[in-house]
Amino acid sequence: MGEKKDVWQGTLALMVLKTLDVLGPQHGYGIARRIEQISENLLAVNQGTLYPVLIKLEQEGSITSNWGTSDNNRRAKFYTLTKSGRKQLQAESRHWRQTTAIIDRFFAPEKAL
Amino acid sequence: MKPLRRIWCRLLGTFRGHPREEDLTSEIDGHLRLMIEDNQRLGMAPEEARRAAVLRFGNARATEETCRDQRGFPLLEAFFQDVRYAFRTLRKSPGFALTAIVSIGLGMAANSQVFSLAEAVVLRPLPVPKPSQVATLLSYLHGDRPFDGASSGLLSYPDFVDFRNKSKSFAGMTAIEDASFGFAVERQAQPQSRFGLLVSGNFFDVLQVPPRIGRGFRASEDQVPGRDAVVVISHDLWASEFASRKDAIGKTVLLNGIAFTVIGVAPEQFTGPDQYTRAQLYVPMMMQPRLAPDAHHNALEDRNMRVLTVKGRLKPGVSVANAGAEAKLISAQLAQAYPDTNRTFTATVYTELELRYARDPYTPLLCGFMLLLAGAVLVIACANVANLMLSRARARGREIAIRLAVGAGRARLIRQLLTESLVIAVLGAAIGLGLAEYLAWANSPIVIPLENPFVVVLSLDRQVLLYAALATFASTIFFGLIPALQATRTDLVSELRSSAGKTDKRGLFIGRNTSVIAQVAVSLVLLVVAAQTLRGTLILLSGPAGFRTDHLLMAGLNPQLVRYSPARTQEFYDRLLDEARRMPGVKAAALTLTIPMSPQVGTRIVPEGFHLPPGSDSVNAVGTTVGDGYFRTLGIPILRGREFLKTDKPDSPRVAVVNEVFAHKYFPGGDAIGKRLRLGGSTGPQLTIVGVAKQSKYIFLVEPTIAMIYLPLRQNPETHLTLLLQSDGPSADLAPSLRNLLHSLDPDQPLIAVRTMEGFFGQRVTKMLRLTAGTLVAMAFLGLVLAMTGLYGVMAWSVTRRTREIGIRMAIGARRLDVLVMVLKHGVALVGVGLVIGVLLSFLASRGFSAAFNVPSFNVPLLALVAVGLLAVAALGAWLPARRASLLNPNLVLRQD
């Protein structure tokens, strides 16, 4: 467990948005689990980082929250992606792809500078 | 957008906060529970599952803390907590709270009041959008600064046009000329004189003031002389003459007998391009030749007729200095192109503030001086509050020690104490602003009844509030910081032990003594200045103005308003004067161009035999043009020679009368009678001095000694004159018969501003001086009361502090008198040091004061009187606590602990 990498600041928000986009409404624990699963347990989502990010996204209007009941009948707070959140996700994923593409080109061995 | 929305949410969170608190806890607990359940599903034992989850989760409460900080603004929340706490503390000690708040309130009232006056007369920007872009183009002739002596700073129309065409610094330039109009809404009505402006067609565009209703001038209305008779009226005139009806647009009004179409109404807040006078009518400059025909001059073509104020809106990014440099260049070109008229002509560009200062440097100086004094009152008030806080620091020592002991940081405590000070300052400021608002409401508007009245509207607008806010924060730091620093520098161990018999910290004591000394010094300065001003004012008010201020009726006349020719004007005035002198109840009558206590006319002269300053061809003199009988009517004695007579006609030898200072200055060591001088320049007409008039006051009671020259009206004809009537009985009684007389001479002729000299003098001079002196005396009194409260507080506190010591002294044989003297000595020593410093400061302040206002300078007996008085009052302040100390019963005191 100690080997796992902490999520970089900034990218966590994007992962949260993508998770909600794929899974629909989800509680905090679910989001954390999902991110860890997708990363094949390479990432550890620290709760001390996750909840402030959720609050920030909610304040910015990208997600909303409602109390509901989880699969095993527990009361939990569910987060839902809003319209403006979806737009933000699209914009940021486009931006992210661009950035990674550029970085990739730098590190591609055959196309040295 | 998103960051903004987030700030808004956090602000909401700061104030709502609490209900969501449990939300957060249960959400995080839920997270933990789900983790435990998952762990159990993976086959862990319940205890094991819980342990693993908690380990993995980390510190739940720390997470909550981070989230909570995210929800609101923690600093802001703490601030509001502090404010609430401050209110509770203040409520617990109402005596302290009240004294502190009232002290600051009085200091703030003095400051806001004086600043609102300064704002109204000096600092208030023009009532136009982006006023800082508007600058004024000024001319100077003969190298004189604008408004210096004969230089009016004004431009001629042809020069204006050249500047407008050549200048690249201004986005637009507009020309403005003050004008009076004979105004009537219908042909039958008797015309009334209204003040207005002749303006170039782009006036409203350059100032960016769109009319409230209707339209501004079209470009085509600024091209052909005399063609487009259109007028924009002020909001005031719209209300008074048209009852604010929309159909006023398109109506016809008569200006000087010519029909004009009303095309627009200026917005209410736009009172004209001057801070004092309020224009009622705006008329295209091109109508000037028809409104006031002049056979000799065409104002639109004559480069010598410098009568226009030129204002322009600078292009964005162009500085006033750049525009000024460009103006200098263009004026040099004009001087070359038109040497006849522009040889000595230069131009420069002033900001609005520079313009106001150049036109009248005394008012800003006076305002600055009063602000300094008001600042001194606030300093005394702050010192008072600081004193109170220092003595409270002792009472609150235990509370603060306990807080420090349970782990509060020193910075946090200082912040909380400063918040308390801020609450006091803000409450004080609220009281002060309330008082100032009341004073503004009671005194405003201040109207100086010139022909075009000066109107000064006091209001607490944005600049005043900003100033008050700055003063509030400054005083918070001033009276709050040192007590806060000292209060938190506590020796915990001794503080938490029983406080009885504990000695004070040296620092506290020095702080309090220093503040008393400062208070005494500053209030001495205040008292000296106020006493000096009061004395000066009384001397001025009781001393002679040098002319008659009673039994005089004045009325303005301007036959140009009904378009008389120069010959007809002359005839009209002759008849008017003859008839007026025959009116029952009239002792004497005369015509004059200007009346005393108002702006006079600058003239350039060349006195014969006088050594002109190197590089100049003439000198400036203040002058006016008056008719025969002027000196008799105004009661100004002619010391030598004669006054003007009916026989001083255009074809007889040209003459002049001068005053004593003029005679002495230009013709020293001999009689001025019979001496000659030239008018305008070395080639101008030659005048012979026929009389020397006694010195009097000319512009204001507070003025430097002025060298004055009077010219006879018949040899120097003017159209816009004032008729002076000396009456037997009350002068106001003459007004109806004067109106009848004028009506019989010409029913269309408007009578401008009929007023008595008593009324005018009272408003213009007495009221202004009383207001100034009254404000100063009130501030000095306030300062004295505050300083005495401070002294009393320190002495009372010192007696309380030394109760035990005094008890012991008395127990071992000190008499009551010894104790009394001991305590008094302390008080008198403080006051004495304060007095010495105050006297030194007074010397400095007084020197600046008398240099600036040319009033009687520093007066030693007065200073001694004020100092002794202050000492006596201070002794009383020290005596009360001293007496209390001397009445202590040593038995009781020593048994107390």
Image: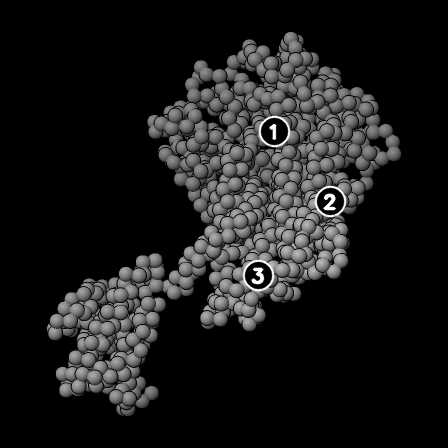
Chain ID of residue with mark 2: B
Which one is earlier in the sequence, the residue at label 3 or at label 1?
Answer: 3
Tell me the crowding category of disc 1: few under 14, some 14 to 19, or many 20 or more residues within 10 angstroms, Cα based. Answer: some
- Marks 3 & 2 on one chain: yes
Q: Which of the 4 quarters of the picture holds residue B118?
A: top right
Looking at the rendering, in which quadrant would you find the N terminus of chain A? bottom left
Q: Are marks 3 and 1 on the same chain?
A: yes
What amino acid is labelled 3 in the image?
A: Arg
Depicted A71 relative to depicted B435: above or below: below
Of badges 3 and 1, nearer the viewer stands 3
The residue tagged 2 is: B872
Residue at left offset 50%, top offset 44%: B431
Left or right: residue B750 compared with residue B218: right
Residue at left 14%, top 83%? B41
Name the element at disc 2. helix
Q: Please, what secondary structure does the residue beneath circle 3 have? A: helix
Q: Nearer the viewer, mark 1 or mark 2?
A: 2
Report how far apart the C-alphas of labels 3 and 1 lie in the structure.
54 Å
Residue neighbourhood size for the residue with mark 2, other residues' Cα within 10 Å, grouped as few (<14), some (14–19), many (≥20): few
* Residue named by callout 1: B763
Q: Which residue is mark 3?
A: B394
Extreme-bottom residue of the structure: A109
